[in-house]
Image (tube, helix red, strand yellow):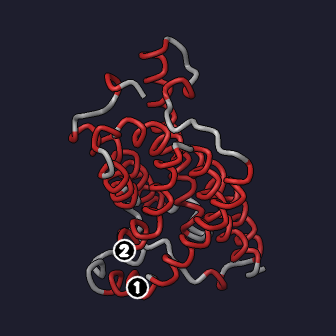
Amino acid sequence: MNQEKEIRNVGKLLILHLLPGAVLSIIYIVLLKTGVLSEYPKLVVLGLAGLLSIVPIELGYLFYVAKKEEGTFKIFKVLGLKSKLKLKEYIIYIPLLFIMTGLIITALKPLSNYLLNTVFRFIPRWYNCNQELSVYSRDSLILLILVSFFFFTLIGPLVEELYFRGYLLARMKWMGKYSVLLNAVLFAVYHFWTPWLIASRVAAFLPLYYYVYKKDSLKLAILVHCIANFTDVIALIMLL
């Protein structure tokens, strides 16, 4: 990445990292308060909020930068981390990073629950998207599975990785190794709808983003992120 295109304004970095998540949270609250899709799990509402916020904001900003810098709407021209790994590297790194991420999140689940019940106990129940899903009808669960697959597994991770790693992390290299840490922390905070998971997200995804940064591979970040989120789809299918 050309050093002239790096983002050296910390305030700008904070805004670019956190604004999409803040807008998503606002839309999520509005949808909940207006009763939109109230008969369905809140994750369905959260998915709709994400579709209306982070997709147009994050992709829209990438299109804006591409047009400004390259005179075209081809966003891949303004992305970094585009080194191509060999097939055997994907075969090795993807399972290892996926397993590592899953183990860390599982190990830190008690901490996340503790933070939810103490530090973040002020969060109202109507806002918490973690629900007992077995009380919902089969049709509601099928809709949730579709939303989880198409948005939380495919669209959301793809857009987020293009924006957070392909664009932002690639333009933070002036910070050296601290760029990965700051990117991981701000990405965790960006999930305003689940603040009690900030610590576990940082711990779980930091190794992934370190390897992504080290290997200069955006594709590696996308694949692991999508596969990790797909495990939620499998868990939902088991409820049918």
Location of the C terminus by quadrant is bottom right
Around disc 1, counting alpha carbons within 10 Å, would you say few (fewer than 14), some (14 to 19), or many (20 or more)?
few
Q: Quadrant of residue 103?
A: bottom right
Q: Which mark is residue 196?
A: 2
Q: Check disc 1 and report the residue beneath it.
A: 113
Three-letter amino acid code at the position of disc 2: Trp
Residue at 47%, 38% in the rendered image: 58
Location of the N terminus by quadrant is top left
Of callouts 2 and 1, which one flags the residue occurring earlier in the amino acid sequence? 1
Residue 98 visible in the snapshot: yes
Q: Position of residue 55 (x, y in %)?
A: 53, 42
Residue 125 or residue 53, whichever sits in front: 53
Q: Position of residue 183 (x, y in %)?
A: 36, 51
Three-letter amino acid code at the position of disc 1: Asn
In the rendered picture of this protein, how many numbered marks are placed on residues?
2
Whether residues under marks 2 and 1 lie with C-beta atoms below 8 angstroms apart, the answer is yes
Can you name the residue that lies furthest to the top here? 71
Compared across the picture, whether 94 is left or right of 179 comes to right
Q: Which mark is residue 165?
A: none
Compared across the picture, whether 1 is left or right of 51 comes to left
Compared across the picture, whether 6 is left or right of 147 comes to left
Residue at 22%, 35% in the rendered image: 9
Q: CA distance from mark 2 to mark 1?
A: 7 Å
Around disc 2, counting alpha carbons within 10 Å, would you say few (fewer than 14), some (14 to 19), or many (20 or more)?
many
Residue 53 visible in the snapshot: no
Q: Position of residue 41 (x, y in %)?
A: 59, 71
Q: Secondary structure at mark 2?
A: helix
Q: Position of residue 160 (x, y in %)?
A: 51, 47
